[in-house]
Image: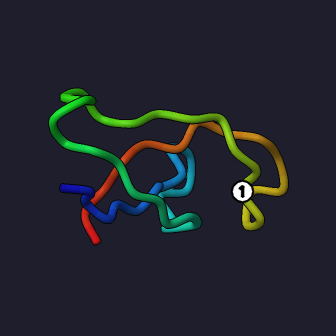
Amino acid sequence: MRDRIVLNCDVCTRKNYRASRNKKLTSDKLEQRKYCPSCRKHTLHKEGKV
């Protein structure tokens, strides 16, 4: 039931983090503010394809 996802930086579009989410409980895409090593600051990371 849990799908593997990748979190992409919204600024530089690099794949930085891997996560999993339950498709039935969360229908919308995951968005989190996380640290991006290439940008060297906290940016918005959105769900992308693996």
In the orientation shown, which residue stands out farthest toward the front? Answer: 1
Horizontal relation, residue 8 to residue 32: left or right = left
Q: Secondary structure at mark 1?
A: strand
User: Which residue occupies 24% across, 30% down?
Assistant: 25
Horizontal relation, residue 26 to residue 43: left or right = left
Q: Quadrant of residue 36?
A: bottom right
- On-image quarter of the C terminus: bottom left
User: Which residue occupies 15% across, 35% down?
Assistant: 24
Callout 1 crowding tier (Cα within 10 Å): few <14, some 14–19, many ≥20:
many
- How far across and down, in percent of the image, does residue 9 sit? 54, 52
The amino acid at mark 1 is: Cys
Looking at the picture, tell me which residue is in the foreground, 8 or 2: 2
User: Which residue occupies 18% across, 55% down?
Assistant: 1
- How far across and down, in percent of the image, does residue 33 sit? 65, 35
Q: Is residue 33 above or below residue 36?
A: above
User: Which residue occupies 77% across, 65% down?
Assistant: 37
Looking at the picture, tell me which residue is in the foreground, 13 or 47: 47
Horizontal relation, residue 30 to residue 50: left or right = right
Looking at the picture, tell me which residue is in the foreground, 21 or 11: 21
Count of numbered circles on the image = 1
In the orientation shown, which residue stands out farthest toward the bottom? Answer: 50
- How far across and down, in percent of the image, does residue 46 sit? 43, 42
Q: Quadrant of residue 44?
A: top right
Q: Is residue 24 above or below residue 16?
A: above
Applied colour scheme: rainbow
- How far across and down, in percent of the image, does residue 20 sit? 39, 57
User: Mark 1 sits on what residue?
Assistant: 36
